[in-house]
Image: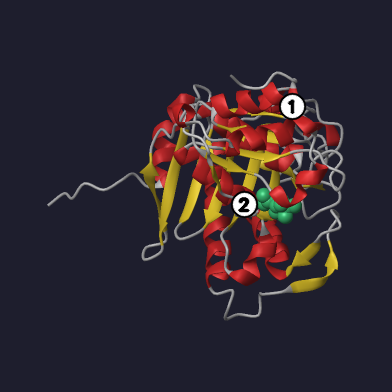
Amino acid sequence: MQTSRPLTLGEFLVAKQSDFPFATGELSALLSSIRLAAKVVNREINKAGLADVLGDVGNDNVQGERQMKLDVYANDTFARALRSRGEVCGMASEEEEDFIAYNDPIHANAKYVVLIDPLDGSSNIDVNVSIGTIFSIYRRVTPVGTPVQLEDFLQPGNQQVAAGYITYGSSTMLVYTTGHGVNGFTLDPSIGVFSLSHPSMQCPETGIIYSINEGNYVHFPEGVKQYIKYCQAIDVATNRPYTSRYIGSLVSDFHRNLIKGGIYIYPTGTKSPQGKLRLLYECNPLAFIIEQAGGKATDGYRRILDLTPSALHQRVPFFIGSTKMVEDAEGFLAGTPAP
Ligand code: P6P
């Protein structure tokens, strides 16, 4: 008896390959390598309390942030998975100061580069709060067959070929877009398969959840302070006060807001004069996803995907989520409060 079951990620990749008339299967193979790495990292995270993978490695990464054992493990796992296929000529990671070039003969004719935050929110690992991986994929802009260059990585987000994230939460999900909508796949650990669980994801145009670290309130720009007070004001006509939800794990806060509607804000502040989040491997991929799901992502003034990167680890202020909520916040930043 044929029992109906959701498409697996592998079946979905093959079915959607026709979205790319000149597809040769390379992007599908690249996404399959990310799928494999996600399963391997998921396994380590799920036994974090038991295996010797908790805690830090005793040094800081290029960001000056304490490097957790699982940060290093995730970085190495994704780097190995990407290197093991011939589709990627280089990788840039939050955990690596410079990009990694795959200049050997196998990768010389590869046409994609990958930028990745292998394990975002890793400070939450030791307290069993959900964390995530974020990835961004571009076609190289330098000639195929030559060594990959920094300019292959410093492309505006509107040039992304694909972007996605894995959230290691109550269940493990892989969510991605190739510019033809957003689809979510949930890992069935009993058979080690990602199955289509959230087809054609759409972000509600507005919502009642705002996500921001209010502990930094005194450091926020005046417009952000006004927006927070707007969220907290009583107005039944606009469903306020809103609900404050801040996990401290970008992927988790983003994923909840994508599904339920909401806004995530990491603005400038004295501790983070440019903002905290990185344009290339956090903001751009999530901005691609949210726009494909009908939402919006800006730096408070400009579309994230149109920003021209100047450095691998460049930070930008980040306003992302339901279109109306982002526009309300922009209104306060522009000095004109939302109606
Ligand atoms: P704060 C984790 O370090 C991260 O990059 C995001 O996952 C998270 O949303 C944010 O930083 C939390 O930063 O300053 O509020 O602790």
In the displayed structure, 48 sits above or below 100; it is: below
Q: Outermost residue toward the left?
A: 1
Left or right of 137? Residue 29 is: left
Left or right of 303? Residue 27 is: left
In the displayed structure, 2 sits above or below 42; it is: above
Left or right of 36? Residue 330 is: right
Nearer to us in this view, 232 or 146: 232
Residue 187 showing in the rendered view: yes
Q: CA distance from mark 1 to mark 2?
A: 20 Å
Give percent across and percent down for residue 175.
50, 43
The quarter holding residue 48 reads bottom right
Local SS, label 1: loop
In the displayed structure, 108 sits above or below 178; it is: below
Give percent across and percent down for residue 276.
78, 45
Type of residue at label 2? Thr
Specify how the rendered protein is coloured. Answer: secondary structure
- Mark carried by residue 108: none
- Mark carried by residue 133: 2
Left or right of 265? Residue 274 is: right
Nearer to us in this view, 77 or 234: 234
The quarter holding residue 126 reads bottom right
Nearer to us in this view, 179 or 66: 66
Local SS, label 2: strand
Q: Residue at x 49, y 21 (%)?
A: 21
- Mark carried by residue 156: 1
Q: Residue at x 50, y 48 (%)?
A: 174
Type of residue at label 1? Pro
Nearer to us in this view, 6 or 272: 272
Q: Quadrant of the C terminus?
A: top right
Give percent across and percent down for residue 43.
53, 68
